Image (cartoon, coloured by chain):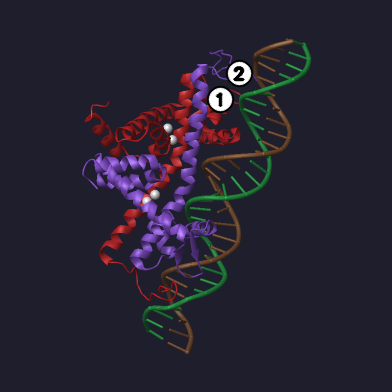
Chain colours: A red, B purple, C green, D brown
Amino acid sequence: MRRVASGGGLVTKKRSKSSASASTELATEPVQADRFSKARSARSASMLEDYTELIADLIAANGEARTTDIARRLGVAHPTASKTIARLKREGLATARPYRGIFLTEAGLAMANSVRQRHRLVVDLLIAVGAPREAAEADAEGIEHYVSDATLRAFEAFLHGRGQR
Amino acid sequence: MRRVASGGGLVTKKRSKSSASASTELATEPVQADRFSKARSARSASMLEDYTELIADLIAANGEARTTDIARRLGVAHPTASKTIARLKREGLATARPYRGIFLTEAGLAMANSVRQRHRLVVDLLIAVGAPREAAEADAEGIEHYVSDATLRAFEAFLHGRGQR
DNA sequence: ACTATGGTGTAGCAATGGCTACATTGTGCA
DNA sequence: TGCACAATGTAGCCATTGCTACACCATAGT
Ligand SMILES: [Mn+2]
Ligand SMILES: [Mn+2]
Ligand SMILES: [Mn+2]
Ligand SMILES: [Mn+2]
């Protein structure tokens, strides 16, 4: 197919590859696809990140992390948490034996620590640029998973430069 | 079950509800669950937001938005785009007839416009706080979907106060 | 020591979002 | 005027992340 626009029969434009300025168009595509691809990867990791952070918090607060507590904190049904914990185990981030609590491996703990630090940094930055505290806390829960190291370093420098942190 | 920690048989702690300070613990849970819940909603909407924005961009640039172009820009296989476009139609955001291009409904166009504006605002803010341009562009593709209106207004005010925008 | 109760596990369903493989369609160009 | 071939559609696979329903287990308290 060689392409013809048709909408309501108005436009009539041919194009061998793409109709827009052949200069920018060809450069834009792969770059944009890369950005979307990165976002998809981050989305896929976000669940693991939240779980490890939460498990570490529960162990710190309660001495243990139980499936039901994890589920309640996340606001999901317990089989949902159970299934994701299975994924954590599969990916070497956690261990668990039936009817005992959930434990983090070294890799899981490392993830938890870096994720917690990043979470706090994002909240602090949002507040520093004027976001209401609760909005900052809520938004950070999603935003955190998409902040690159380069951006994170910029956040740190920004906060330093303001005396905060 | 009344709960007993056990890990390696070390800890031995009972708890009727939760072991942590009964004052904060009970207040923390629902608040945190709410934040996670909001993040899940945003995650669910993110795909629709990216598609409407992209379709509007393609129509502006090419006069039409074809399934293959959408897929290539997103970096996914065309049946993946095709399936998501079906969801857009189902949710009243787009229309399409076989072998013609994709069109946005009024609702879809409204979403595209607000999403594009939010996207730009997020990129501008990230750059304003010092993120490298390409990191800002890449991170914004994920971050944008999790920024609340309250935080967005704060971003606007922050940029205004700096003469940017 | 028993048992009621609540934590835990498991089965099975649905929606979403990836993919590959293959069928169908439209049209630019020979 | 046809037809080759790219674009589009469709079928069917898998993984993830939700859910409800139900079975099983551990123990706190009697
Ligand atoms: Mn999070
Ligand atoms: Mn977090
Ligand atoms: Mn996006
Ligand atoms: Mn965007």
Picture quarter with the C terminus of chain A = top left
> Which residue lies at the image location 41% right of the left edge and 65% below the top edge?
B65
Under mark 2, the amino acid is Arg
Looking at the image, do the residues carrying marks 2 and 1 touch, with CB atoms under 8 Å apart?
yes
Under mark 1, the amino acid is Arg
Q: Do callouts 2 and 1 point to residues on the same chain? A: no
Q: Residues within 10 Å of mark 1 (few under 14, many from 20)?
A: many
Q: Visible in this render: residue B3?
A: yes
User: Which structural element holds mark 1?
Assistant: loop
| Residue that mark 2 sits on | B3
Q: Residues within 10 Å of mark 2 (few under 14, many from 20)?
A: some
Specify the quadrant of the image occupied by residue C4.
Answer: top right
Judged left or right of residue C13, residue B75 is: left
The answer for how far apart the CA atoms under marks 2 and 1 are is 9 Å
| Residue that mark 1 sits on | A66
The residue closer to the viewer here, B29 or A42, is: B29
The residue closer to the viewer here, D5 or B19, is: B19
Residue B14 is situated, as x and y percent measured from the top left of the image, at 59, 14
Callout 1: CB less than 8 Å from ligand 2: no
Relative height, residue B152 to residue A72 (above, below): below
Residue D11 is situated, as x and y percent measured from the top left of the image, at 60, 61
Q: Circle 2 marks a residue in which chain? A: B
> Which residue lies at the image location 24% right of the left edge and 33% below the top edge?
A157
Callout 2: CB less than 8 Å from ligand 2: no
Residue A108 is situated, as x and y percent measured from the top left of the image, at 44, 29
Judged left or right of residue C11, residue A95 is: left
- Looking at the rendered structure, the number of numbered marks drawn on it comes to 2
> Which residue lies at the image location 47% right of the left edge and 70% below the top edge?
B100
Picture quarter with the N terminus of chain A = bottom left
Judged left or right of residue A117, residue B29 is: right
